[in-house]
Image: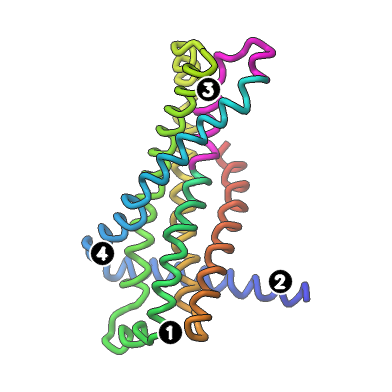
Amino acid sequence: MILNGFINFIYHVGNITLFFFNTLLSILKKPPKLKYIFKNMEDIGVNAALLIILTGFFTGGVLVVETYPTFHKFNAEFLIGALVSLSLTRELSPVLVALLVTARSGSAIAANIGTMRITEQIDALEVMAVNPLGYLVAPRIIAALIMVPALTVLSIIAGIIGGYVVGVYLYHINPYLFWQKMVTLTELKDIYGGLFKASVFGVILVLIASYFGYHAKGGAEGVGRATTTAVVVASVTILILDYFLTALIY
């Protein structure tokens, strides 16, 4: 059973890698139209903005609530601003945004492409000499490459504001020290590293969702199964990749 699971894992890793390179090749041969990219940017990014802002705001607030008692014991409350900023830029915002986009957009992508596969719309594209990867997958990957980092920036800003509101107005932390330590101790490397991780996560989540949707079979039940598998695999992959990217960058 373990051996079969390992073989199945290697099989999917190989196929997803080929799927990615074929999509990349389709982009190089014939870049997708801007209107398709913009439409997917709206679906993936703009329509998720409110969700990301709310999540980021309360994540920043929770960070202050959780850490203030410990910092207060050592009279180090002035460092909480830096802790909020570093936690969000390095780790929490890139990962949370990627997981939220996976749950929201990744599931929709898998279901949409899976439905097209089941109803033979993808076969129709191939008959008309339209590359399905270039038409269905490439615009979504480019959109995610742009919008997931953009949503991450939005999450970081919302989280810092949330941390500031809770820290200053609930725990009466000195507002000047909150901002001063945050700006002093947060380096450009922290921001760039977080955005790089977000870019990788964006490509990965769309790639995996598209792959499982593209290979869906078995009618409506198969589409549901492909959607569930896509969300689970993408989420786990993001968390595993997060470890290796963090170790590599920082």
Q: Quadrant of the N terminus?
A: bottom right
Q: SS at mark 2?
A: helix
Residue of label 1: 118
- Report the Cα–Cα distance between label 1 and label 3: 50 Å
Kindly report the secondary structure that dominates the magenta region of the rendered protein: helix
Which circle marks residue 6 in the picture? 2
90 is within the stretch colored magenta: yes
Which circle marks residue 36 in the picture? 4
Residue 87 coordinates in the image, percent (x, y) = 55, 32
* Residue depicted at x 45% and y 62%: 106
* Residue depicted at x 48% and y 21%: 182
Indicate which disc, 1 or 2, sits on the residue closer to the N terminus: 2
Three-letter amino acid code at the position of disc 2 = Phe
Q: Are marks 4 and 3 in contact (CB under 8 Å)?
A: no
**On screen, 128 above or below 108?**
below
Q: Are marks 4 and 1 in contact (CB under 8 Å)?
A: no
- Report the Cα–Cα distance between label 4 and label 2: 37 Å
Which circle marks residue 82 in the picture? 3
* Residue depicted at x 60% and y 51%: 239
Q: How is the image coloured?
A: rainbow
Three-letter amino acid code at the position of disc 1 = Ile
- Report the Cα–Cα distance between label 4 and label 1: 22 Å
